[in-house]
Every structure is written in structure tokens, then in C-alpha cells.
Image (tube, rainbow, N blue to C red):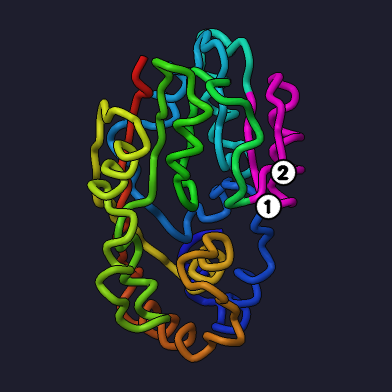
Amino acid sequence: MGQQQHSRQGFDELVAEGAAVPTEGWDFSWFAGRATEARPSWGYALRLAERLSGAPAALDVQTGGGEVLDFALRHADRAPVLAVATEGWPPNIAKAAALLAPRGVAVVAAPEPAPLPFADGAFTLVSSRHPVRAHWTEITRVLAPGGTYLAQHVGPHSAFELVEHFTGPQPEEVREGRHPDREGAAAEAAGLEIVELRAEELRMEFHDIAAVVHFLRKVVWMVPGFTVEAYEPQLRGLHERIEREGPFVAHSTRHLIEARRPD
């Protein structure tokens, strides 16, 4: 469906459409033509594919529906000797298991923020894309000496133009949460050595209110407790703004972090 057809739909129809889309996993293909987000220059999934090739034992934490790990495994030169993924949300556990089992990946239910259910030093590579929170002591514990943590994290004040439209101005400590410098310091405090830490700000565009509704339902920590009913006035105001001015622009922040457990 093209953007012009989206714009001809009414507010109620668009909101209903965004509210009906399933939210399991991290497949964002539904947003095609409705929302865009620039990608970081470092190419996380392909970088992960390189590290997975022939890894003795790899763990992907908070794997979502397994889509990113699946992509990386398909592009790896060799499969890891042992590959495991964790996920805490039941709909995603089932989706990840169905997607990753054919690739030899064991998907383990691991609720947040419980300790990881693995032995000390069990993995030579731990990875994660957009974890809700990085549990540094647990990551360090399950890494073997010389092992690597490779991840792409959501950075501070990500999409806050959109968030603050619904919540109002946020305190500075909330806006600056997930700061890469703080996360690097926390990783070091847990016993890891920072190998690389890079951050980028990326442009986002929302072309209709259906995309906003689906985004806030899918990325639940952006506006905690979001429902269409609770935020109908803000949704209607944003819909009218998009109709009047064009796509709503926000900015996401991402950082790449690679850390190593000393020998």
C-alpha cells in the first residue's frame, strides 16, 4: 500500500490497523512505506556473522523472534560449534524456536531479569541486539576467559521527539539513560575490557499514525502502558500534524559495544 493511499485513510481506520498488527518478534517489514529508520554504519548483523563463523560456543541474549541471529547465521561462513539463544517473552520464545531450531540453535526461556541459566565461562561469544537491559555481571560470568561480548544497544533519548509527544518532557536522568559512556563504565566495573564503543544518531520518519501505534505497541518501553484508548488525544493530534505537515521526524540513537573478558 502506497503512502498516498495511507494518507486518504481516516484516523479511526489507521489507528485500528496499527492496533491489529501482531507484535511478536523483531521483524519490522510491516513498516515498509509507512516508517523509516536509518541504519548504523557498522552493520551489526554482518559483523555478528563474522564472529559466529566457527565460534566454539555462542549465546545470543534477548534474541526476540530470532530474526537477527537467523540472518547472521545465514551469512556466517561456518556455523558455531554450539549456538544458544535466550528470550523471556512467551510469544517470542515460540517464534524464535521455530525459526532457529532448523539452524541448530537451542532457544532457552530466560525471564528478565533473572540470572542466565548457564554455567560460568560457558560461552566464547555473547551477543545481543537491542537488549532491554545489559546485565553486565551475568554477561561477564558466562563468558569464558578471552571471550567477547558483541552487541548493538539502544542509546540515550532515542526517539524522544515521539516519546515526549505522548509523555511530556522527561527528566534528564531518563533522557540520558543508556548512555554509551555509562554502559562502558558498567561493563568495565563488571570485569570486561572495552575493545570498541561507537555511537550514532539516526533519522526516523513516521508517515502515518498507524505506524506510530504499531511502533509503540511493539517497542513497549518507549511509552510504558501505551494503549490507544489512554493516548487517543495525543494520537489524534499527531495524526492531524502528519496530515498537515508530512512525516513526523524523530531520531534514534544506537551504539556498538565490543568488550572482552580478560584471560
Label 1: few (<14), some (14–19) or many (≥20) C-alpha neighbours in 10 Å: some
- Identify the mark at residue 89; answer none if there is no mark: 1
Where 65 falls versus 101 (above or below)? below
Task: Choose between 157 and 243: the one closer to the eye.
Answer: 157
Q: Amino acid at mark 2?
A: Ile
Secondary structure found at label 2: helix
Q: Residue furthest bottom?
A: 233
The quadrant of the image that shows the C terminus is top left
- Residue at image position (57%, 16%) is 57
The residue under label 1 is which amino acid type? Trp
Q: CA distance from mark 2 to mark 1?
A: 6 Å
Q: Quadrant of the N terminus?
A: bottom right
Indicate the position of residue 2 as horizontal and vertical percent values.
50, 60
Is 51 left or right of 17, judged from the image as shown? left
Name above or below for residue 254 compared with residue 163.
Answer: above
| Count of numbered labels shown in the rendering | 2
The spot of residue 251 in percent (x, y) is 29, 60
Q: Is residue 222 above or below residue 45?
A: below
Residue 122 in the image: state x and y as whole percent.
57, 21
For the point 35% across and 32% down, which residue is it? 191
Which mark, residue 93? 2
In the image, the segment drawn in magenta is 84-111
Residue nearer the viewer, 258 or 92: 258
Tag 2 and tag 1, C-beta contact below 8 Å: yes
Q: Is residue 105 magenta?
A: yes
Q: Is residue 179 magenta?
A: no
| Residue 170, percent from left and from top | 32, 77
Circle on res. 128: none
What residue do we see at 76% from left, 34% from top? 98
